[in-house]
Amino acid sequence: MARQSVEEIKAENRGLYGKIIETLLSNESHFEEAEYQLLKFHGSYQQDNRDSRRERRKQKLDKEWMFMVRTKMPSGTLTPEQYLAHDSMADKLGNSTMRLTTRQGIQLHGILKGHLRDAIRYISDCGLTTWGACGDVVRNTMGPAAPIKDEAHSSALELADEISQVFSAQTSSYSSIWLNGEKLELNTNNISEPENEPLYGELYLPRKFKIGIAIPPRNDVDLYSQDVGLVMHTENNKVLGYSIYVGGGFGMTHGIETTYPCLAKPLFYCSKKDIAKACEAIIIVQRDNGDRTDRKHARLKYLVAERGIDWFRKEVQKIISFPTEEIRKANFDTVSDQLGWHEQGDGKLFVGIHVAQGRIKDNEEKQNRTAFRQIAQKFNCSVRITPNANIYFYDIEESNRSDIDQILKDFKIPVGNDFTATRQTAHACVALPTCGLALAESERVFDTLLDSIDSLLNELGLDKDQILIRMTGCPNGCARPYNADFAFVGRAPNKYAMFVGGSSSGDRLASLHKKSVLFDEIQGEIRILLQDFVENRLRQETFSAFWGRTHEELTHPIPKQFHLEKNEY
Ligand code: HEM
Ligand code: SF4
């Protein structure tokens, strides 16, 4: 039988129920394709341990099936209790680690099928949800992570919450499958009708949809990589409105020129009160016009890139009834976080702590899981996850600062502000062993890579220069590689496509520099370009500015630049 498309699966499984309940009740080790696709909407990816595949195949055993469960929290905000609930779940139900994600969520890995329902219910019991963390809907809404207590930041958080609620899918399948009391029953009578989804309709969106809010000059949410990027404008600390950018997105496939990363493009400015309606209109245009025949071509970015931003703007303006203006100027200077201790504006403090690759775990070398648990427990401080997958603890009294520093010291956790500036912002996606799409290692080799790059930076006197480096295990681009200064994108085991020329403020796309470099060759390739930078940079010039000045064609990206080296086109 031909494989069903995701659009067919959505059409046949109204309300996103499928046979999830049946499979949960059965002795099956894993879900079939349709349920695998539907599960994503519920916040889980079915995976298997890729490290054990070969051995198990030899022994004629089934794959080692397991699940990733992703919690969604607008702007990455968690109470201490919610943080601690995830921490305890990691041990009871997962693989004893937590993964902070680049969309300010938390992933638990290694959950067995028999524990899946408990995990989702536990997350719901602590006041959060996994609903819509994955799937063809509006995903976790990102917001400025720094816990600064001012009008702008609280307004951005409120907006992220509002967007998250307004665009949550309405079907009751989530509560019936995962939250419905103690008993799990097969009861298909309550399967919701399509009219229960007034915005999404029966087929939901053609593809995932991502929204992020930024307050200039900090572009921590990587605004231009979002389907909808909202830039806040203020006057005398009062929020006036937002400039809206649309059509960013990063996934592509190596060698297929019809797939390419895009930066979001300027749509219009509108006042604060109209912003949710503007987002709704944008979603409707994508819902009705996005390409449902090919998932590799279904993101909003292709609609905007191929039909043009002017066409798209007109379609949105047909739906809305409020005035819009031309986009207002905003200057971003960094995508970085504020590591170390800072005042939050109301007399209390926050501390930003670097979390290598977003992984919270204890090992012999350092124990950030225990350290963070103790901080959350003893000082009852709230948590914010940053889009660089670092962590802020906030609402801290000055009198507790030295005790927290002591905990960090006891468990060997550097806050990271004395790292090279490059290491502070570097990031790698999860990849092996859990991600079924990984073509090469990423998270597990990234520290080794950064050690070698650190020594190069120190040798060249560039330890204070912020050079944005990202790595992914495949071209889907979960760690947002295509606007970094340097990016390494998995192609095959130990082989990476090398991209150069994005920017440390996130507003320029890189292009393919070398089709394939071996892991051990990466430092040498970077050295060549950094040596040139050291010799030819202007005073105070960043690597991003240097590359922009010496490679002007990059301001107008073309699909070829992501698939062919420059000498090939
Ligand atoms: C078409 C493209 C994509 C596919 C099929 C895809 C698929 C996946 C899968 C399977 C995982 C789970 C890996 C694991 O935890 O074991 C994952 C994680 C994730 N993806 Fe994607 N992804 C795509 C593109 C993107 C892009 C472009 C972004 C953001 C710009 C993104 C953001 C994330 C985030 C935040 C995570 C969580 C883990 C992390 O922070 O690395 N994804 N994705
Ligand atoms: S970029 Fe590829 S390998 Fe990395 S997590 Fe995303 S899908 Fe997996």
Image: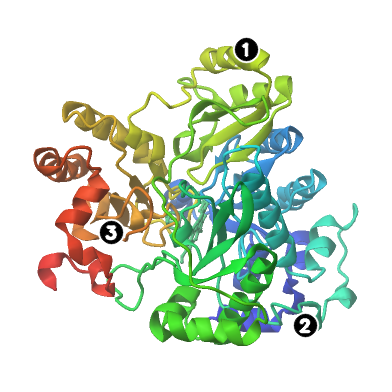
Q: Please say whether residue 71 is visible from this viewpoint.
A: no
Q: Which residue occupies the foreground of this view, 70 or 220?
A: 220
| Dot label at residue 366 | none
Would you identify the image quadrant in which residue 24 lies? bottom right
Residue 54 position in % (x across, y down):
42, 51
Q: Which of the pair 418/233 is nearer the observer?
A: 233
Q: Is the shortest distance between ligand 1 and the CB of mark 2 under 8 Å?
A: no
Residue 326 is left or right of residue 535, and the answer is right
Instruction: Give whichever of discs 2 and 1 has the lower sequence position.
Output: 2
In terms of sequence position, does the residue under pointer 3 or pointer 1 come before the other? 1
Q: Of tags 2 and 1, which is closer to the observer?
A: 1
Please state which of the two labelled residues, at mark 3 or mark 2, is closer to the viewer: 3
Q: Amino acid at mark 2?
A: Pro
Residue placed furthest toward the front = 236
**Mark 2 sits on what residue?**
194
Q: Neighbour class for label 1 at 10 Å: few (<14), some, many (≥20)?
A: few
Task: Residue 507: give x, y in percent of width and height.
Answer: 37, 58
Q: Give the Cα distance between marks 3 and 1.
A: 43 Å
Say if 152 sits above or below 244 in the image.
above
Q: Is residue 259 left or right of residue 388?
A: left
- Residue position marked by numbered label 3 in the rendering: 510
Residue visible at 68% across and 53% down in the picture: 113
Look at the numbered discs 2 and 1 and tell me whether their residues touch, using CB distance below 8 Å: no
N-terminal label among 3 and 2? 2
Marks 3 and 2, Cα distance to the nearest angstrom?
Answer: 42 Å
The residue located at (24%, 49%) in the rendering is 545
The answer to whether any part of residue 494 appears in the image is yes
Kind of residue sitting beneath label 3:
Ala
- Amino acid type of the residue that numbered disc 1 sits on in the rendered structure: Asp
Q: Where 298 sits versus 79, above or below? A: below
Few, some or many residues within 10 Å of mark 2 (<14, 14–19, 20+): some
Instruction: Give left or right: position of 551 versus 159.
Output: left
